[in-house]
Image (tube, rainbow, N blue to C red):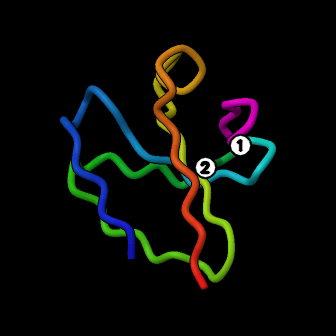
Amino acid sequence: MAVFRYIPGEHNVIRVDADGYNTCTVPANPEVHSSGLDFIALNPGENYFICGFAGHCSDEGMRIAVTTG
């Protein structure tokens, strides 16, 4: 389980694939988490998340990759 804490309305959390993570690209019809306190189940292997607000991922580096065993 990953827990994301942030100020609602200023950030969000979107699960992406490796390409979306590397290019900071939001997929079509994404599940957007925006509560400010999000609990997201992790899949085995690689998990990728970005902030979907313009420039936050690409310019400010707001992305994270989590590997589970």
Residue 21, position as x, y percentages in the image: 68, 42
Q: Which of the pair 33/24 is nearer the observer? A: 24
How far apart marks 1 and 2 lie (CA) works out to 6 Å
Task: Tell me: 41 left or right of 27.
Answer: left
Q: Is residue 39 above or below residue 34?
A: below
* Residue 49 x/y as whole percent: 54, 50
At 64% across and 83% down in the image, what residue appears?
44
Vertical side of 16 occupied by 68: above or below? below
Q: Please check the rendered image and state whether residue 24 is part of the magenta-colored stretch, yes or no.
A: yes
Q: Which part of the image, by quadrant, shows the C terminus?
A: bottom right
Instruction: Quickly name the residue at label 2.
Output: 30
User: Residue 41 occupies which quadrant of the picture?
Assistant: bottom left
Q: Which SS type dominates the magenta stretch?
A: loop
Determine which quarter of the picture holds residue 43.
bottom right
Amino acid under label 1? Answer: Pro
Whole-percent x, y for residue 63 in the image:
52, 39
Q: Are marks 1 and 2 in contact (CB under 8 Å)?
A: yes
Quarter of the rendering occupied by the N terminus? bottom left
* Residue that numbered label 1 is attached to: 27
Q: Which residue lies at the image location 70% right of the left edge and 33% below the top edge?
A: 25
Residue at (72% x, 43% y) in the render:
28
SS assignment at label 2: loop
The amino acid pointed to by label 2 is: Pro
Q: Residues within 10 Å of mark 1 (few under 14, many from 20)?
A: some
Which quarter of the figure has residue 22?
top right
Under tag 1, what secondary structure? loop
Residue 39 image position (x, y, % from top left): 32, 68
Find out whether residue 59 is within the magenta segment: no
Callout 2: 10 Å neighbours few (<14), some, many (20+)? few
Taking the spot 54% from the left edge, 14% from the top edge, the residue there is 59
User: Which residues are drawn in magenta?
Assistant: 21-28
27 lies left or right of 63: right
